[in-house]
Image (cartoon, grey):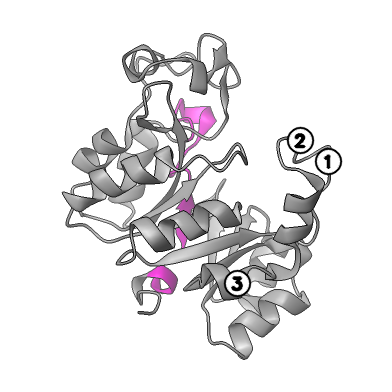
Amino acid sequence: MSAPDWLTARPVAHRGLHDAARGILENMPAAVQAAIAGNFSIEVDIQLSADGEAMVHHDNALGRITEGSGALLGKTAVELKAVKFKSTPERMMSLSDLCSLVAGRVPLVIEVKSHFDGDRKLVARMAEVLAGYSGPAVGMSFDPDQVLALRELIPSLPRGIVAEREYTEEDWPEASAAQRRGMTHLRHAFRTRPHFVAYWVDELPAAAPWIARNIFGLPLLTWTVRTPEQRARAARYADQMIFEGFVP
């Protein structure tokens, strides 16, 4: 299996086609609908709830763009679905809600968020949801253990590694020193066997993604492209961009 052609055919809207100035916030239903209207693939994040549901949200806690506070892992899906995005009537979705909303009209790029504790419940729930979904989708994660879970639990789903050059304790407090070392230089690729790589645009070019792309033939996405300079870098060093803040 290889990465699908659609993955690099069109730019990917980062957390949907959001625009805070118009009251459309990341990962909310309106951002998904805007991306569908623009015919863009949609990158979304999923987090685990207390009762094992896959919820569409980037942060592991409420408060930055939503009402309320507290860790998502400490709240049930029912509680999280009641959470409103700030200054909007819209509420948090589950992965199942997202699939029902998109209904295969555009592809999904699903990033599995991790607490680096080896828990596979989030990927297991993702597998259950996608088993009943016929639309195009791929999965990816920073955490090699979650990429390995994607490989083992959803082997028919194309999977990718999200990566950057280094992982500090400050930026990755839940990961151990050994886990942070294991994430560098895509060194886990022979174990996780990704079909594509998504690398931070500000750190391109870099040896590891160059080797993945040019030696092993893996498509290279780059995130998060916001400026003209980043767009030029993406065009030069990657196969496609994950973007936000403008409409390509």
**Which residue appears at 32% of the width and 40% of the height?**
125
Q: Are marks 3 and 1 in contact (CB under 8 Å)?
A: no
Q: Are marks 2 and 3 in contact (CB under 8 Å)?
A: no
Q: Is residue 13 magenta?
A: yes
Q: CA distance from mark 2 to mark 3?
A: 23 Å
Q: Are marks 1 and 2 in contact (CB under 8 Å)?
A: yes
Magenta residues (range):
7-26
**Which residue appears at 41% of the width and 16% of the height?**
88
The amino acid marked with disc number 2 is Pro
Q: Is residue 195 above or below residue 103?
A: below
- Comparing 90 with 174, the one in front is 174
- Comparing 227 with 122, the one in front is 122
Q: In the rendered image, which quarter is residue 200 located in? A: bottom right
Q: Residues within 10 Å of mark 1 (few under 14, many from 20)?
A: few
Which residue bears the numbered disc 1?
A: 169
Which residue bears the numbered disc 3?
A: 189
Q: Residue furthest bottom?
A: 215
Q: CA distance from mark 1 to mark 2?
A: 5 Å
**Which residue appears at 32% of the width and 31% of the height?**
94
Query: Relative to 48, is 144 on the left or the right?
Result: right
Q: Residues within 10 Å of mark 3 (few under 14, many from 20)?
A: some
Q: In the rendered image, which quarter is residue 54 located in? A: top left
For residue 173, which numbered disc appears in the image? 2
Q: Position of residue 203 (x, y in %)?
A: 77, 64
**Which residue appears at 64% of the width and 65% of the height?**
231
